[in-house]
């Protein structure tokens, strides 16, 4: 009789252990599935960013410099290159936002949005943003607009000019 009672308790304990093990396996499978989804999303954004880089070509700085110093001299090729450059910056931010939603990016991801003050720190960048934001969420538009409100259209030029050597009387 004592043996039957012990056997029942052991059987019950073993069954509880099996159920607990199955629950842990289910949790682990769910975690792996979520991680795989996040990896696929991240890979998509990275592929998009690589495409943007490839489409900018070998010398995007020439078009960007023209946007900063001579925006009225842009041609169609410059416009296409700059579109990819500006979009690259947005994809970076949107990728971080998505990774944060999936629990894989720090809470300080929003600090990176301040980068757009530089990224769109010229007249052409602001015109691009005015068209781009039509397809964005209101929250995202508000975040970017707040960053851009702290600057003007001359951020890029002001910084680049500050790097240049000072003009001297001999150079003039």
Image (tube, rainbow, N blue to C red):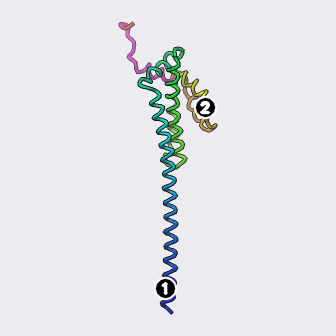
Q: Which mark is residue 97?
A: none
Q: Name the residue at 50% across, 32% down.
A: 88
Q: Name the residue at 52% across, 17% down.
A: 75
Q: Which mark is residue 133?
A: 2
Q: Name the residue at 54% across, 26% down.
A: 151
The percent position of residue 126, horizontal first and vertical second, equals 57, 25
Q: For the C terminus, which image quadrant?
A: top left
Near-viewer residue (65 or 158): 65
Determine which residue is flagged by label 1. Answer: 7
Residue 87 part of the magenta-drawn span: no
Which numbered disc flags the more N-terminal residue, 1 or 2? Answer: 1
Left or right of 77 on screen, residue 166: left
- Dot 1 alpha-carbon crowd within 10 angstroms: few under 14, some 14 to 19, many 20 or more: few
Q: Residue furthest bottom?
A: 1
Q: Are marks 1 and 2 in contact (CB under 8 Å)?
A: no
The percent position of residue 96, horizontal first and vertical second, equals 51, 41
The percent position of residue 112, horizontal first and vertical second, equals 50, 37
- Dot 2 alpha-carbon crowd within 10 angstroms: few under 14, some 14 to 19, many 20 or more: some
Q: Nearer the viewer, mark 1 or mark 2?
A: 1
Q: Residue furthest left?
A: 170
Counting labels gives: 2
Residue 166 part of the magenta-drawn span: yes
Q: Name the residue at 47% across, 35% down.
A: 49
**Residue numbers of the magenta segment:** 155-170
How far apart are the alpha carbons under marks 1 and 2? 69 Å
Label 2 residue SS: helix
Residue 9 higher or lower than 2, as above or below:
above
């Amino acid at each position: 009789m004592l043996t039957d009672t012990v056997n029942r308790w052991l059987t019950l304990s073993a069954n509880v252990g099996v159920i607990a093990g199955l629950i842990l396996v289910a949790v682990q499978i769910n975690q792996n599935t979520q991680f795989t989804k996040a990896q696929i999303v991240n890979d998509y954004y990275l592929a998009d960013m690589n495409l943007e880089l490839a489409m900018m070509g070998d010398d995007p700085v020439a078009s960007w410099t023209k946007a900063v110093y001579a925006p009225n001299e842009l041609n169609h090729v410059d416009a296409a290159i700059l579109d990819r450059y500006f979009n690259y910056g947005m994809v970076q931010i949107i990728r971080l936002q998505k990774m944060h939603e999936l629990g894989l990016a720090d809470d300080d991801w929003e600090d990176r949005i301040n980068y757009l003050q530089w990224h769109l720190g010229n007249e052409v960048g602001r015109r691009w943003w005015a068209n781009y934001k039509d397809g964005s969420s209101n929250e995202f538009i508000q975040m970017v607009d707040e960053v851009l409100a702290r600057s003007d259209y001359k951020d890029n030029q002001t910084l680049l000019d500050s790097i240049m050597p000072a003009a001297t009387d001999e150079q003039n």
